[in-house]
Structures are given as structure tokens and as C-alpha cells.
Amino acid sequence: MLLSLGLVLASYLVGSLSSAVLICRVIGAPDPRESGSGNPGATNVLRSAGKAAAAATLLGDIANGVVPVLLAKHFDLVPWVVGGCACAAFLGHLFPVFFGFRGGKGVATFTGVLFALAPLMGAAFCAIWLTTAAIFRYSSLAALLATAAAPLVGLALGLPGAITGALVIMASAIFWRHRANISRLIAGTESRIGKPKV
């Protein structure tokens, strides 16, 4: 029990390591929470610090989801603990204790969680994201559709109920964090991929 609780707490702390903020501090770029969209994620870092910093941010955010889940699986812990570690890492990214609880929208960390839980589920997420983005040219829509599909893919793969439940919790949080994007999509004012914001 102590190992389980310790891993869940450690997962939250790992998730709280905001790659966007740390990388921008190292290279002397503006704090992503104070520039652009205000979201500490790869897309906003791309606007203010360039492709290399954005790529590093994306990889760091994905790692925040991969590492805790793989650790929990390494210790062969029961599904509810694995799901708890996944949720804790994800919530750490959304509400990082080290950075005033001002985190990102969670899509990259969620992607890392999916790949760590079941590589096929992560691959399905990426395929849906890429297909939707290519057709409609909305990054937010692609993320939302891929996120909505993830728990269904988990069910199809026969993942334990505790894991599927964790996926539903994380997917719901992503939709909540994208509520402004959803409003813009409905209004037809959401920015398309490859076009500058107006």
C-alpha cells in the first residue's frame, strides 16, 4: 500500500514538471504562461521560442505521462494503482504544484499515458488526430475527437475497468480544458492549422 501511494504521489510530482516553462527558462524565452495563448504547451512554445523548443516541450510532456505509468506497470501493481498513477501524472500537468497550479491542456501527457498503457491505443489516438487535422485543419478538433475515442479503444482492447475509468476521467478533463476552443469551433472562429490567429 505504501508503495502504491508513494508511486501515485511521485506520478503527480513528475507530471508537475512543466516542460514548457522549464525549457523556456533555460533558453531565455518568454514564459509561455505569460505570452501568446497563455497555455504552457508545445503549440504556444512554438510561437514564442521556435521549433526546437516546441519539439523538446512535446517530448517532455509525453514523457510525463509515459514514465509514471511504466513504473507502475514495472512493479506489477493492480489496475486501480496503474490508473491512479496515470491520472496523477495527468493532473500534475494540468495543475503543477511547482508552477502555481497553472498547467497545460493535457493532450501530450494524455498521449504518453496511452502509449504506456497500450501502444496500440496510443497509435490509434495519433491516427485519429492526424486524420482529423488533415481533413478539417483544426488542432483542437483533432485532439477532442482523438481523446473521445481513447476510452472506446481501451474498451475494445479489453483493458481493466479501472484503467478505462481513468481514461474517462482524463478525457473529461481535456474537454473541460478545451471549453473555450469548443465555443470557438461552434462559432466558426477557431484558428485553423497553418493560418495565423486573428
Image (cartoon, rainbow, N blue to C red):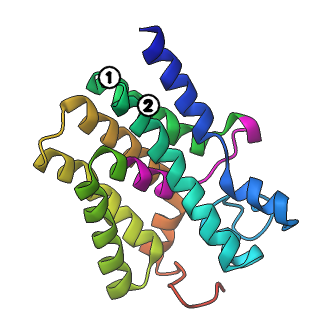
Q: Which residue is mark 2?
A: 85
When asked about the image quadrant of residue 10, the answer is top right
Does residue 108 belong to the magenta stretch? yes
In the picture, the quarter occupied by the N terminus is: top left
Locate residue 151, reporting x and y percent: 24, 48
Q: Which residue is mark 1?
A: 77
Q: Residue at x 52, y 51 (%)?
A: 63
Which numbered tag is attached to residue 64? none
Locate residue 22, reporting x and y percent: 76, 53
Please say if 133 is above or below 128: below
Q: Secondary structure at mark 1?
A: loop
Please say if 189 is above or below 4: below
Does residue 52 belong to the magenta stretch? no
Can the viewer see residue 106 in this picture?
no
Q: Residue at x 76, y 74 (%)?
A: 49
Query: Label 2 crowding class (10 Å Cα cut-off): few <14, some 14-19, many 20+?
Result: many
Q: Which residues are magenta?
A: 98-113
Q: Is residue 35 left or right of residue 42?
A: right
